[in-house]
Image: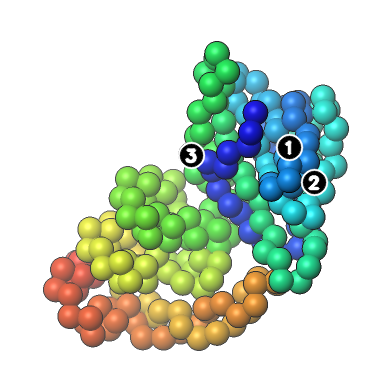
Amino acid sequence: MPFLIAGWNLWNGRPTPVFAAGPGRVIANRNDAIFGPVIEIDHGSGLRTCHALRRYGSSDVVLGLTVAAGSRIGALASGYPDDLSYLQFAILLDTGGGELLSLDPSPFMFRDPANRRPALASSSLNAAVWAGDRSQLISLLALGLNPNRPAVDGSLPLEWTMMTQDAELTSALVAAGADPRARTAVNLGTVVEGLGQTIAGSGPRILQYAREGENPSLIEALARR
């Protein structure tokens, strides 16, 4: 079966180890010309996880191996300095008849409080804002993600609503406790090894940014806190 990524791209420094999300059996361990090492684990009850370690990634498992939750199964790429190392991670449900459905990783990933603390969590909020997906944003906030924690690139979810000019998503974030007085990220700084210069710093406060843009709906949404 061709590997189709319908989950998340998780990037980090290199080389970063990759661990099994839960106990199961390795049912696929192959090297794909595009996705690199691809490891698929059957967790029972039709639930599977699929990991593509990308170019120069490495697999530590063999076909048929039984793995425990948290056991190392491979590592991200450690290739050229200008390569972006990341894991393509998908959760799949076998509905029978050979059909696989892709599931949202969020309820699985953020059930553990420890997974809600890293910058990845806020990056997920930012992605929902950028996509204009209110239901996904509400779901992520309901899982306990902090809208005031900077994402991997140093930006905040409210900043992205300022860029997209989305007053509805602004209201949702403010209702969840996002701070309109927080500063935007504009200065340069190295956040993750291998990614070069990315935004991380302090610029105008979000409410000030909105007032300068003269969008009454955004200003009103921010003032509701």
Q: Residues within 10 Å of mark 1 (few under 14, many from 20)?
A: many
- Give the mark, 3 or 1, whose residue is nearer the N terminus: 1
- Comparing 106 with 144, the one in front is 106
Q: Position of residue 220 (x, y in %)?
A: 16, 70
Quarter-of-image position of residue 185: bottom left
Query: What is the distance, in whole Å, between disc 3 and disc 1 at their CAs?
Result: 19 Å
Residue placed under numbered mark 2 in the picture: 74
Give the SS element for disc 2: strand
**Marks 2 & 1, CB-CB < 8 Å contact:** yes
Residue at x-position 67% and y-position 64%: 84
Residue 168: x and y in percent read: 23, 58
Query: What numbered label is drawn on residue 39?
Result: 1
Q: Nearer the viewer, residue 188 or 36?
A: 36
Please tell me in which quadrant of the rendered image residue 147 appears: bottom left
Labelled pair 3, 2 in contact (Cβ < 8 Å): no
Q: Is residue 202 above or below residue 129?
A: below
Q: Residue at x 20, y 66 (%)?
A: 221
Q: Position of residue 63 (x, y in %)?
A: 82, 28
Image: 15 above or below 182 = above
At a point 73% along the width and 42% down the height, the residue shown is: 32
Q: Which residue is tagged 3?
A: 104
Percent coordinates x, y for residue 169 in the rendering: 28, 58
Question: Please, what is the three-letter code of the amino acid marked with disc 2?
Answer: Gly
**Disc nearer the start of the sequence (3/2):** 2
Q: In this rendering, would 111 be left or right of 219? A: right
Q: Nearer the viewer, residue 8 or 70?
A: 8
Give the residue displayed 23% in from the left and 81% down from the top: 213
